[in-house]
């Protein structure tokens, strides 16, 4: 362990796993970690650094994928022979590779974007990977359909119909590597200069994609039901981007009445569309899930986007969109020239994962896991109810804590960091004129923390926030 004297900077904008990745990579390139050198196990390194094992797993997996480390079954991780590998000079400061010693180490991370990688169905994934790669199909390594493998699109259509009441034929589905790619594809179909309505706070990457592609974003206020349609009607927006099943990051669920109002807005104007981002609808803890907005659409105005990244793993960059039939001709003209960005091998694997029932079993397991952590966190947070309010707790894998005693978001984040706990401020998701405004709310994501870690993390927050 002495070979890896890593110190982490919890205040850095760089994620902890990237800090670990860059440190080990620099040590290998400099020769400090020689060929065949065995690295500590992920568990031991996590204990040494006082971070979650998932954080170390992500760093090691990236190093393995880039060829710096080799994972030897039952033996561990070893430094690879770098002879023949390309080496690129970097302008990255050396100091950034080794964060300063005085920084507070983040032992517990309430990241709102994490998933429980320890529960990943590795055995099933390996089995399906082996089956796909053993197929004697040379076409598997050629370019496939730009929309994605037909078999995968068929299984997605069946899943969406059963789980989300989405009406879709395989011909309406397009597969891509992540929601961001699919938004880029939609922008190329619609062309630059579109007026797009968004909420604030919102999914920041979507906002950046729209702005970077020369679209004009109109910020529409929310109330307790979501985007206000009366204010939307006062804009010149032709497209509305919403997350009705679980708005990120606020966490509210759009009620049926507001959904109908939104559909009425879309159908009342020529060329109006709604982009429905249904990123984590699988996880709901109160009442029955409300069917997707697309399932209520009779005018063909909803573009539905879903992903497997939130339910399986972030590295599985397989997302999909369902186009209204009226837009299929537009896709054929402007979008089909862009090939599917997902490996055909991965598409076959996820198709088998869906078709053979693995995905359903995994979701049932994860609902139980996340529900247990969700309930435990709410119970532990009762000690804060005298000066905090909790919201967004009915779905997803994070909730919001709003301070009512005058404590600002920045103060809460800094005090928590001193106790080794990372919490995320709501203000980072503000866009438009709201960007930069002060906030009194923090997000607590619980997907990456075990129940024991949640209890200890909340105990530390009590020390940080309760005088």
Image: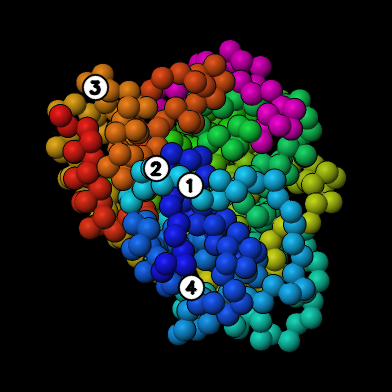
**Mark closer to the observer (4, 3):** 4
Q: Residue at x 65, y 64 (%)?
A: 29
Neighbours of disc 3 within 10 Å: few (<14), some (14-19), many (20+): some
Q: CA–CA distance between discs 3 and 2?
A: 29 Å
Q: Which residue is mark 3?
A: 404
Is label 2 in a helix, a strand or a loop? loop
Q: Position of residue 57 (x, y in %)?
A: 47, 64
Taking the spot 21% from the left edge, 51% from the top edge, the residue there is 456
**Which numbered disc, 1 or 4, marks the residue that appears first in the sequence?**
4
Q: Are marks 1 and 2 in contact (CB under 8 Å)?
A: yes
Using the image as rendered, state which of residue 57 and residue 368 is in the foreground: 57
Asked where in the image residue 171 lies, by quadrant, the reply is bottom right
Q: Residue at x 14, y 37 (%)?
A: 383
Q: Nearer the viewer, mark 1 or mark 3?
A: 1
Is residue 90 in view?
yes
Callout 2–callout 4 Cβ contact below 8 Å: no
User: Is residue 219 a member of the stretch shown in magenta?
Assistant: yes
Residue 284 disc label = none
Instruction: Name the residue tied to disc 2.
Output: 103
Q: Please tell me whether mark 3 sits on a helix, a strand or a loop.
A: loop
Classify the position of the N terminus by image quarter: bottom left
Where does label 1 land, which residue? 99
Which tag, 2 or 4, sits closer to the chain's start?
Answer: 4
Whole-number angstrom distance, CA of label 1 to CA of label 3: 35 Å
What's the CA distance linking mark 1 and mark 2? 7 Å
Separation of marks 2 and 4 at Cα, in angstroms: 24 Å
Using the image, determine if residue 334 lies above or below residue 352. above
Q: Which of the two discs, 3 and 2, sits closer to the camera?
A: 2
What's the magenta region? 209-237
Residue 368 position in % (x across, y down): 30, 60
Magenta run includes residue 176: no
Which residue matches tag 4? 39
């Amino acid at each position: 362990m002495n070979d890896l004297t890593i110190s982490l900077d919890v205040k850095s904008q760089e994620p902890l796993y990237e800090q670990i990745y860059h440190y080990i990579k620099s040590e290998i390139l400099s020769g400090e970690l020689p060929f065949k050198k065995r690295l500590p196990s992920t568990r031991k390194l996590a204990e040494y650094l006082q971070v979650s094992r998932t954080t170390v797993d992500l760093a090691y997996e990236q190093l393995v994928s880039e060829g710096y480390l080799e994972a030897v079954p039952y033996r561990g991780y070893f430094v690879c022979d770098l002879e023949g590998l390309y080496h690129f000079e970097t302008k990255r400061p050396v100091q950034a590779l080794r964060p300063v010693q005085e920084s507070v180490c983040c032992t517990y991370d309430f990241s709102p974007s994490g998933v429980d990688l320890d529960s990943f169905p590795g055995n099933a994934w390996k089995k399906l990977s082996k089956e796909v790669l053993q197929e004697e199909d040379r076409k598997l390594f050629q370019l496939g359909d730009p929309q994605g493998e037909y078999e995968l699109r068929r299984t997605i259509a069946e899943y969406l119909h059963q789980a989300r009441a989405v009406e879709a034929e395989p011909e309406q589905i397009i597969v891509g590597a992540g929601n961001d790619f699919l938004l880029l594809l939609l922008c190329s179909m619609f062309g630059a200069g579109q007026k797009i309505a968004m909420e604030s706070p919102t999914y920041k990457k979507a906002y950046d994609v729209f702005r970077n592609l020369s679209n004009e974003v109109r910020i529409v206020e929310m109330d307790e039901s979501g985007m206000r349609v009366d204010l939307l009607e006062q804009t010149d927006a032709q497209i509305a981007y919403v997350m009705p099943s679980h708005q990120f990051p606020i966490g509210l669920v759009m009620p049926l009445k507001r959904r109908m109002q939104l559909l009425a807005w879309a159908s009342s104007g020529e060329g109006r569309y709604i982009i429905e981002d249904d990123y984590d609808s699988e996880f709901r803890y109160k009442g029955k899930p409300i069917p997707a907005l697309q399932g209520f659409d009779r005018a063909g105005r909803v573009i539905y986007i879903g992903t497997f990244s939130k339910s399986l793993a972030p590295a599985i960059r397989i997302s999909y969109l369902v186009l209204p039939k009226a837009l299929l001709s537009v896709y054929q003209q402007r979008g089909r020239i862009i090939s599917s960005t997902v490996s055909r091998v991965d598409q076959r694997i996820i198709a088998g994962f869906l078709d053979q029932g693995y995905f359903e079993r995994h979701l049932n397991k994860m609902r139980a896991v996340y529900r247990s952590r969700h309930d435990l966190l709410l119970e532990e947070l009762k000690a804060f109810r005298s000066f905090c309010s909790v919201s967004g707790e009915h779905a997803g894998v994070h909730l919001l804590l709003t301070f009512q005693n005058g404590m600002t978001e920045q103060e809460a984040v800094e005090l928590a960091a001193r106790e080794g706990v990372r919490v995320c401020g709501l203000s980072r998701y503000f866009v438009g004129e709201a960007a930069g405004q002060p906030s009194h709310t923090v997000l607590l994501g619980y997907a990456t923390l075990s129940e024991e870690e949640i209890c200890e993390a909340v105990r530390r927050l009590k020390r940080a926030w309760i005088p």
